[in-house]
Amino acid sequence: MNLFNYRRRFSHIVQVGDTPMGGFHPIRVQSMCTTSTMDTEASVQQTLRIAKAGGEYVRLTTQGTREAENMQAINAGVRAAGCNVPLVADVHFNANVADVAARYCEKVRINPGNYVDTARQFRRLEYTDEEYARELQKIEDRLTPFLNICKENHTAVRIGVNHGSLSDRIMSRYGDTPEGIVESCMEFLRICVKQDFRDVVISIKASNTVVMVQSVRLLVTRMTRENMTFPLHLGVTEAGEGEDGRIKSAVGIGALLQDGMGDTIRVSLSEEPEAEIPVARDIVDYVTGVRKDADLPINPEDVQIPAFYNWLKPERRQTTRVGDVGGGQVPVVWTEIPVEGVVVLNPFTLNAETADFLRSHPEVIVVSRPHTANRLGEHRALVFALENLGLHNPVLAFHDDTNMVHAAIELGVLFIDGLMDGIVIPDEQLGLGILQAARARFSKTEYISCPGCGRTLYDLQGTIARIKQATQHLKGLKIGIMGCIVNGPGEMADADYGYVGAARGKISLYKGKQCVEKNIPEEEAVEHLLELIAADRKEE
């Protein structure tokens, strides 16, 4: 892994209809329909709008066999309109549905958390090694016939792991950890390898960008160890909408793309699906254009990785406290560089004289201001060089581009990596938003909201607007707003409250992982949520 210069990870090519991914092919962008998969005309028209916006794959939910069979009609309608965009069936809870969908779609997504294992119920299960091995054999016995159907029909597969829907079996053995997330995926990949089925793309998603990034990094490490080169699908699930959803997606996806990982991406916004495509395209173009073409590359052999830095499990660099900066305090946001008390550096201007000055003045703050477009490489190289010289001055990352997506790509990974003590950026609110998306500092209410799909059981966008309007003043609160239970309770595990579709027009409310009210009529549910929050805050 080259930490300093952009180099795309090698993956083998997976054929998805007429649009292959991986290998030398460009990074693909995609989205997902929010229509009912039984509504053929609406699904065809929304697919066409996504494709017109630049979407290269379109996914539709297939709750049951009827929906899977109707993919044949949707596929025919899209082709009749002269559009060759590959269609992807999204399957949860019922492996038989995947068998049907594989005959009518170019790709089928299955979720290891509920393909054979029962849906997550947060139960603690105990297995002997022999019993655990039998569970794995059940998966192989069920997955192999599906892979054979895919071979016969030239259908690709996405093994899509979601942090919010890990099985109780995985949780009981590995815990709620990146190791558990990765093992959930590797169990299925090993079967694919054994069956000589290579048309597989992998995704590991979470609403927590730190969990997502650490899990994908670990997955790539494990795959490399086992000689696997499967391409990667990247996305931050339940990212939300508006500015927050765009920043959060850019932080998580951008962190991985910049280190060369990713062959297709989906930006999950609680908006119309075609609105996701321009954001996804901007993320891809910025990373592959700006960083790849950056001049003055950094020679990795010239930079020793310091002992504190662990790419798989980053921890924050320990620095000297200077006022409200560094020393383990929450990262700061400055809108300009002060005249005094600061040294502006990049790895090319750090020399022996400057190092001696910083050693004599631990109260001086360093502002890392890159010299080239290879900003991540320069930020990392500078911090590593300071650490190797025994210098523990706080470091702030400078960024003068207020484009929210570009700034989030460049800056978010620095805080996931634990390298910086703050940001210098003209827009303070943008800086705070990036820190929150990177889980480094919480300054406002966080909304974990899904993008919606054919499974959504209520007016998602309208509900999000109502809840945000009533709660946005509650600093540090986390609220999950989920269209259905596929990822609901799991993805909201670290949220304070959850609002989840339980049935058509019915809502269940959660406090953390615990359901506290079931099947509330949709028209009353937002008020019930607000009353629940108000009652809890009154008791504090």
Image: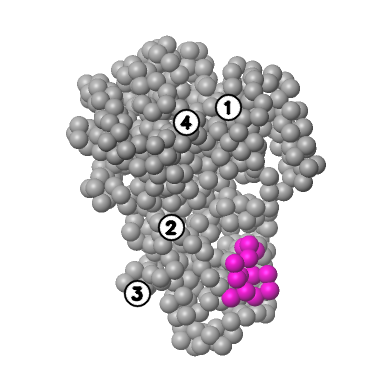
Q: Does residue 326 belong to the magenta stretch?
A: yes
Q: Quadrant of residue 457?
A: top right
4 vs 3, front mark: 4
Q: How is the image coloured?
A: one colour
The residue pinned by badge 4 equals 120
Which comes before the other along the chain, label 2 or label 4? 4
Mark identifier at residue 302? 3
| Marks 4 and 1 in Cβ contact (< 8 Å) | no
Mark 3 nearby-residue class (10 Å; few <14, some 14–19, many ≥20): few
4 vs 1, front mark: 4
The residue pinned by badge 2 equals 313
Front residue of 538 and 69:
538
Q: Disc 3 on helix, strand or loop?
A: helix
2 vs 4, front mark: 4
One can see residue 264 in this view: no
Which comes before the other along the chain, label 1 or label 3? 3
Q: Disc 2 on helix, strand or loop?
A: loop
Question: Height in image: 291 above or below 244?
Answer: below
Q: Disc 4 on helix, strand or loop?
A: loop
